[in-house]
Amino acid sequence: MKSQFIKNYSLLLFLCCLLGFTSMAQKASQAISRPLLLKQFKQNFSDAQKQYQFLAQHLPAGKFPKTYFPNTDRYEFSNSDWWCSGFYPGSLLYIYEQTKDQATYQEAERILKDLEKEKYNTTTHDLGFMMFCSFGNANRIAPKTAYKEVLLTSAKSLATRFNPKVGCIKSWDSKPDDFLVIIDNMMNLELLFWATEVTGDSSYYKIAVTHANTTMKHHFRPDYSSYHVINYDANTGEVKQKKTAQGFANESAWARGQAWGLYGYTVMYRVTKNSIYLEQANKIANFYLNNPNLPADKIPFWDFNAPNQPEALRDASAASVVASALLELQGYVKAPLAKTYVSSAEKMLWSLSNAPYKAAYGKNGGFLIKHCVGHIPQNTEVDVPLTYADYYFLEAMKRYQELKK
């Protein structure tokens, strides 16, 4: 009798759990409907305005936000020459577009003055990140001759790092015979395309296309995952080494590296309309979205091949970049695939809009997104907020709002 009771109770408990999970699944399906997402995004932008006011209050003069360490309540700031310096003003401008808050716009204008001198910086490949995400957005919102001058000078500075023999823009300075190129560099080409569009000087366009073609030839494996770093011979252009810097291993798929590639080749297709770039972007997206190691919430582990899964750290910054890229890429493909890209981006943005990724007001140092990974091999910026996670999260939400439904 007692045994039968236990069996019946166990069955009842199982059915209750099953019904509970079914109910949760139904709620999850409802949670990422377009109306609820748009409502959530409106709240996100409102929260972002408050968060960035909080962040601005803690920003020392002449410094740019880099990250924040929640365990010790400590900020890390940078000078204007840090590769992420453009994301703070860029985020402010995205927030301003949605909220029309004048204090937010004034803060963007203030920090742009501190950033402007980097237009002469020829020691970095990251001028696209630094200057186009900042001054590019500023010029888009309120065009000014001064903004155009900054962007054109920045494009000239970036072009100095191009080596015709290699067919690439150098990423990192190293030994004289080395020529290091990272997949991240695909994100800096948009500045060059803009320069050709504005001036009619095709040399910028040709540099960008050559770099993209060389990268497509050497950076990708047969499954369309990407190496992080290619070391070319500076004199011959031959590949000397394929390796990682921020990923788990030379042959692993560093999550944010895959994101940079996807976003970069999507831009390449937008500008050139060359189908080889659309095909490349689709194949990168296929590797990413159909990877068996991509978690259900679509926030990737910091490396697709990271050990200790599923306990391995996530990188929310990679999800932000991918979500934004997919929302552009969907506009270039046919309906079934476009639907897949949109639904995937919706899932990513819903995850980023809720715990454990979205920060509450006054928390996370004023940054929006938590749980990002910068450089695990060097043990820097590990499981912390990062400015580019915020920037591409804001951009992705803006792009979703602008979708024609």
Image (cartoon, grey):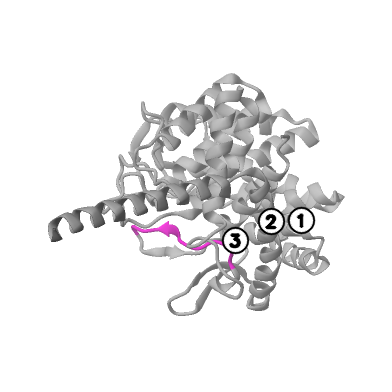
Q: Earlier in the sequence, mark 2 or mark 3?
A: 3
Mark 2 element type: helix
Closest to the camera, between mark 3 and mark 1, is 1
The quarter in which the N terminus is drawn is bottom left
**Amino acid type, label 1:** Gln
Secondary structure at numbered mark 1: helix
Tell me which segment is drawn in magenta: 367-377
Disc 1 or disc 2, which is closer to the eye?
1
Q: Is residue 362 above or below residue 188?
A: below
Q: Which residue is mark 1?
A: 98
Lateral position of residue 345 relative to residue 177, left or right: right
| Gap in angstroms between the C-alphas marked 1 and 2 | 13 Å
Q: Tell me if mark 2 has few (under 14), some (14-19) or many (20+) residues whose alpha carbon lies within 10 angstroms of its own.
A: many
- Residue 108 seen by the camera: yes
The image quarter in which residue 206 lies: top right
> Of residues 74 and 79, which is closer to you in this image?
74
Observer-nearest of 82 and 319: 319
x, y (%) of residue 354?
Answer: 54, 59
Residue 265: within the magenta? Answer: no
State the separation of the CA atoms marked 3 and 1. 28 Å
* 376 in the magenta segment: yes
State the residue position of label 3: 81
Density class for disc 1 (Cα within 10 Å; few <14, some 14-19, many ≥20) is some
Q: Indicate which disc, 1 or 2, sits on the residue closer to the N terminus.
A: 2
Prevailing secondary structure of the magenta residues: loop
What is the x, y in percent for residue 196? 74, 33
